[in-house]
Structure formats: C-alpha cells, structure tokens
Image: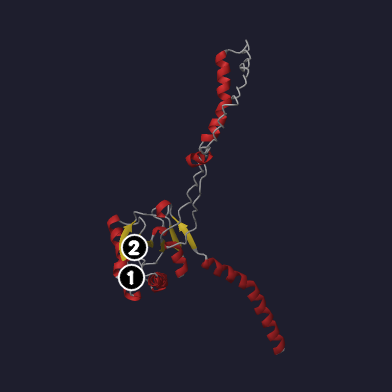
Amino acid sequence: MEPDMTKSILSHTLAQTLVATLPMLAAAWAGSVSAQTVEGSGSSKVMMFDRPPSVEELREVVAPDPKIRTRSIEIIGGAAGAAAKRPRPIDEINYGTAPIPSAAQPAPQPEMQPVAQPAPQPAPQASRPAHKQRRQEVRTEAPAAQMATAEPPAAPVAQEQAAAPQAFGFRINFALNSAEIPAESASYIDAVGALMKEDTTLGLTVEGHTDASGSLSHNMLLSQRRAVSVGEYLVRVHRIDPKRITVDGKGPTAPIAANPYDGRNRRVEFKPAH
C-alpha cells in the first residue's frame, strides 16, 4: 500500500473518531460546569458544588442580588377619600338691603300667596304591612350611604417565595479519620479565599459534617478537626483575618440526606456569619 493512501486512510479514521467523541466530551464538560445542586430543606438548604466554583457563584449564594422590589402604593379611599368627597361649606353671601319707601308713596303691600297644601301621600297598600314598607325604604337608602363610607378592599397579600440557600458546601475527600486537606480539594477552598479577599466585610462559619457511621463522640471531634483545618488553610494560604472565621463541628447531627448513613452527609459547609 502506498504511503499517501495510508496517510489518507488514517486521516479519515481520525476525523471520524473526532466527530464521534467531540459531542460526548462537550456533554461531559457541560455537565461538570453545571454540577451544583441545592440539597437539604428549610433552613438547612445548602448549595453543594461538585467542582471548584467561581467567585461569582459563591457570591450569588452568600450575597445574592435582590430579586423582589417593592413600590409604595397610594391608596385612594377610606377616610381620606370620604373627606375629599364631602361638600365644601358654602361661603357666606352678603345680601343687599331693600330700598326704604318715601312718605308720599305708600309702601306696596305684599301679595297674599295661597298657602300650599301638602301633596297627599299615597296610602300604603293593604297587602304590604307597614313594617315591611319601612324595611324596603331602608334597603333602598343603604347602598348610597355605603358607597360614601365603604373602605376599599384590602390588597391580597403576596405569598412568600421559597427561601434560597444561604450556605454552600463541598464534599472534600478527607482520608479515613484524617483532617488533612487533600491536594485535589485545595482549589475548592481557594475559591472561598478569593471571595473573602474580594469582600473584606464577609465573615464565614466553617462547619464540618459527617455521616452516622461510628460513634457520636468520635464524629463530633472529627468534624471539628476538619473544620479547623479548613479555617487554618484560609488563614495560612490566603491571609484571611482569623476574626472573620469561626469553626464548628456538627458531626452527624445535621444530615442533608434522608439516610443518616448516606455518604452525601460528609461535607464542609460555609455560612455567612451575622
């Protein structure tokens, strides 16, 4: 077989291989980029990252931009509206005085006006008792009075939105019974250090968590040691003021998985210190 033909066949095979594998590589890369999940419930919600996060992603958790804006609404009605609808008092009018008649000309006598007789009222129907007629009159007058004094209906209260997680965490692969940070997990904590350098007012509580395997006393001590190790890394490597960091060992007392023995409960969490 000639060398040129061999080279052509190899190039064609390589091109087919790339076409087949590139979509798989792109899908895997996209999956790693979006590898973050909200776990837990209620006040225990935490944003867990399965890859080293960016500073922007961490900032979005601990200091999210306000999503809900409120506006002042002027309510027209009620007492203010009723006061505005009341008729204003009529200004006092100065009437002129009538001319005084002279002695030579007698004063004209006012004409006698016939006394107006009251219009006869229609007799109530015999089939409708008097108390029912009065009740009907009250009902016809009630809507007008209510329209003048009725308060505007209260605006419906907006339902509270589900609270977003205020903590983030990593599943650092500590060795068994060890608090030493593995080299492959350092980039996770480096992102935290970069966030604290950027926001010098941010304080964090570092919490260590374990699953329920082993004794409670051992897990409580181990989680405390691991939280201290992460805090010391931030102070030693990123020169973060120790006063901005607090550590706490939770052991297995705050699981985020339903099964307390689930390995997903082994994690390190970071919460803003208020």
C-alpha gap between disc 1 and disc 2 = 19 Å
Mark before the other along the chain sequence, 1 or 2: 1
Residue 144: image quadrant is top right
Q: Amino acid at mark 1?
A: Glu
**x and y, in percent, of residue 57 in the image:** 47, 66
Q: In front: 160, or 182?
A: 160
Question: Residue beneath label 2, please?
Answer: 205
Residue at position x 52%, y 68% from top? 33
Residue at position x 43%, y 55% from top? 45
Helix, strand or loop status at disc 1: loop
**x and y, in percent, of residue 213 in the image:** 35, 56
Q: Amino acid at mark 2?
A: Thr
Helix, strand or loop status at disc 2: strand
Residue neighbourhood size for the residue with mark 2, other residues' Cα within 10 Å, grouped as few (<14), some (14–19), many (≥20): some
Q: In front: 249, or 47?
A: 47
**x and y, in percent, of residue 18 in the image:** 63, 76
Color theme of the render: secondary structure
Question: Residue beneath label 1, please?
Answer: 180
State left or right for residue 250 relative to residue 34. Answer: left
Q: In front: 65, or 269?
A: 65
Q: Nearer the viewer, mark 1 or mark 2?
A: 2
Examine the rendered structure and indicate whether residue 92 appears above or below residue 222.
Answer: above
